[in-house]
Image (tube, rainbow, N blue to C red):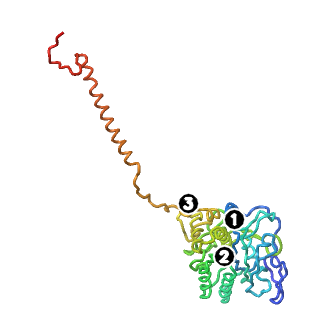
Amino acid sequence: MAILLGTALVVVPSPAVAAAPTCGPAGEDGLVEMPWALRRLDPASAWPLSRGAGVTVAVIDSGVSAIHPLLKGQVVEGRDFNGLPANQGQCDLAGHGTMVAGIIAGKEGTGVPFTGIAPAARILPIRVLPNEKGTNDEGLPGQIAAAINYAVDSGADVINLSLVTLPRPELEAAVKNALAKRVVLVAAAGNRQEQQQEKVGYPAAYPGVIAVAGVDEQGGHVGTSVSGAYVDVAAPGLDIVGPAPGGSGYRAEPTGGTSFAAAYVSGVAALVRAAYPNLDPAQVAERLERTADNPPDGHNADVGYGVVNPYRAVSSLLGTRTDPPAGALPARAASEDPLSWQRTAAVWAAAVGGLLAALLLAARPILIRGRRRGWRPGRRTDSPITG
């Protein structure tokens, strides 16, 4: 069977036949300029402290190419929950999961100005999506739940969920299980289509999941990015570039989406997890939120606590930041002045000195007149003078 994905005609193998080594849409070669998202986040500034080494990020998506130069050697064997079990999650017919994985953990030294946020992290590919189309398939929440449980059992430290599905008890239970096992979950807040009401995105809206919104190159909220009180942080989500699964090229996604914003945040979470392996998911989330580039009000429904900052997320001693949002600084506490007694003594000395100076000035004319009249110290002027 053949289907058309974008401009590439892709042959979809039957479940009984293993996919070819190169499966999925091809991209454009010749990437010469660093994507704006990497310039904005500047992950290399955090690499002297953390590169994500020892951290495994599960990408629950459309699969991940293991042959792209950016990902070769980064992708471990995973699992396919969507009809291609022999491929172990390493076949991406849609191209979505490979872009997400490249953003998270694309390695250095490939000759192009592109790396992942955490280039030393590993990717565990788990395929649940056949394509990039949204779906209300009642079976999908159960598949995603099974994928989350598989990721936890396989030793994932971070799980990236660049997808939105229906809230179901089995999905919520899988999320709670992952959090209880100290696994960090990062999910897309969701994308709103034109003339459509915003819908709460799951699993992003479950408590404990880091929900991610999208921003553009100017730092503004992307109009299609779903807003809500559950949004925690934001990351680049428009005009996105990433690796294509069918070869060594790169694809552009001008409309972007919170899927890619979530991938950037998962990369930062991997940096934090590598630097602070003892932090639990809530503490990782707190670090990302408190070190983000906050909006003026500190938090809002569009971007949460603001755009993640890789360098500060890894390097900051929490509570010492020098640029808190407006209104965040507490009133200065009153404290005793250890030098107050010295200042009091100095005031009194100045006052006494001033008084003595005034008395001397007042007495000076009297002394001068007395000398003119023959006054001497200890001599009475009313006694007769003999000589």
* Label 3 sits on residue: 321
* Label 1 sits on residue: 37
The quadrant in which the N terminus is found is bottom right
Query: Nearer the N terminus, badge 3 or badge 1?
Result: 1
* Label 2 sits on residue: 157
Identified at 17% across, 20% down, the residue is 380
What's the amino acid at mark 1? Ala
Is the residue 5 above or below the residue 362 in the image?
below
Query: Nearer the N terminus, badge 1 or badge 2?
Result: 1
What's the amino acid at mark 2? Asp
Residue 305's quadrant in the figure?
bottom right
Residue 166 image position (x, y, % from top left): 62, 85
Residue 291's quadrant in the figure?
bottom right
Which element is circle 1 on? Answer: helix
Q: Which mark is residue 78?
A: none
> Left or right: where does residue 311 sit relative to residue 331?
right
